[in-house]
Amino acid sequence: MASATLSVIIPLYNKEREIGDTVRSVLAQTLQPAEIVVVDDGSTDGSADIVRGIASPLIKLVTQANAGECAARNRAIAESTGDYIALLDADDTWEPGFLEEIAAMIAEFPGCGIYSTAFNIVSHDGCFPACTPTERGVVGNFFRDSAHRYISIPSASAIPRAVFESVGGFPEGMKIGGDQYMWIKIARRYPVCFSPRLLVNYSKVASNRSSAIYTPERTRYCFEELYDPSAPGEYNEFVARAALSKALVISAKGGTKEAARAARFFGYTKTYRRTLRKVRILNALPRSWRAPLLGLYNNLAWRIARKGL
């Protein structure tokens, strides 16, 4: 049986400072991919020129008018040829053994919908491992086990092409939470495989972070449509978590009505009552207060978590 082919896809928008290191981390892999498809989503800086300046026959650069990260990912998937799609954001990097570990999991645990590894969080305070599972293999219950740990993030995950063909692509027009929307659709139908090896570096300090530039979305996709009263409780709790986390960011950026709608719809949550309260409290404050207060809260929570308190 032939080995699975891996295509790396990178959506790119105004990451001139980071994209070079990102692409070079792919080229440094112990197992080389079939290709690296970079979709420049209407960048206004020199991001595309940085990619053009990296001499490798593996790189395929596609340019398009700005349509958002989800659309850029879908375009990259369409332009790629591999059996498996390894996702990588333009400001994150891989350790040299990432693709080799993904390929090993595919061979050892066939039939999964997502293959992910552990990752480091790169912040202004340094580089720290994220809270993830400690066992390698198929995750027992993705929705339950994700309650207080990270299992899958885009830059640490690979997905079979056949899974995208089955569940559809990323939700175009959704600016925040598109990855969570996709995980929900996949994990509802397929098992998820995880490796505790720390092989990815996720950046919290890169330029042009999407959560910092929120504007109202124009999309036909929403988390409300993923709610299913006939599904197990942990499934709907995960949907609520994703939706309410998004609502926090929306409220901080002034989307009062959108955040209030989410708080009403997902008020059923029992696991994420604290997040629900934060949305309601933030939404009741003057708009000019929200972003600074949420940033202060998140920074404090991060520092407390790092100290193990």
Image (spheres, rainbow, N blue to C red):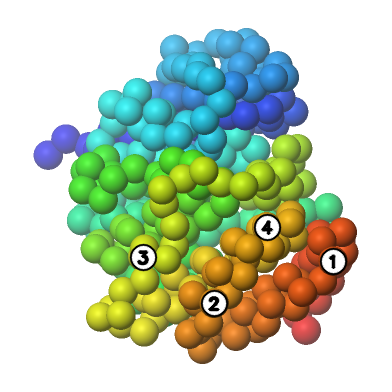
Within-10-Å neighbours for mark 3: few <14, some 14–19, many 20+: some
Q: Residue at x 50, y 19 (%)?
A: 64
Q: Residue at x 73, y 47 (%)?
A: 212
Question: Marks 3/2: CA distance?
Answer: 15 Å
Residue 141's image quarter?
Answer: bottom left
Q: Position of residue 149 (x, y in %)?
A: 54, 72
Along the polypeptide, which appears first: circle 1 or circle 4? Answer: 4
Mark 4: amino acid: Gly
Along the polypeptide, which appears first: circle 1 or circle 2? Answer: 2
Q: Which mark is residue 226?
A: 3
- Say if 122 sits above or below 256 in the image: above
Quarter of the figure that contains the N terminus: top left
Question: Marks 4/3: CA distance?
Answer: 21 Å
C-beta proximity under 8 Å, tags 3 and 2: no
Q: Position of residue 129 (x, y in %)?
A: 65, 62
Quarter of the figure that contains the C terminus: bottom right
Q: Which mark is residue 286?
A: 1
- Say if 81 sits above or below 173 in the image: above
> Which element carries disc 3, helix, strand or loop?
helix
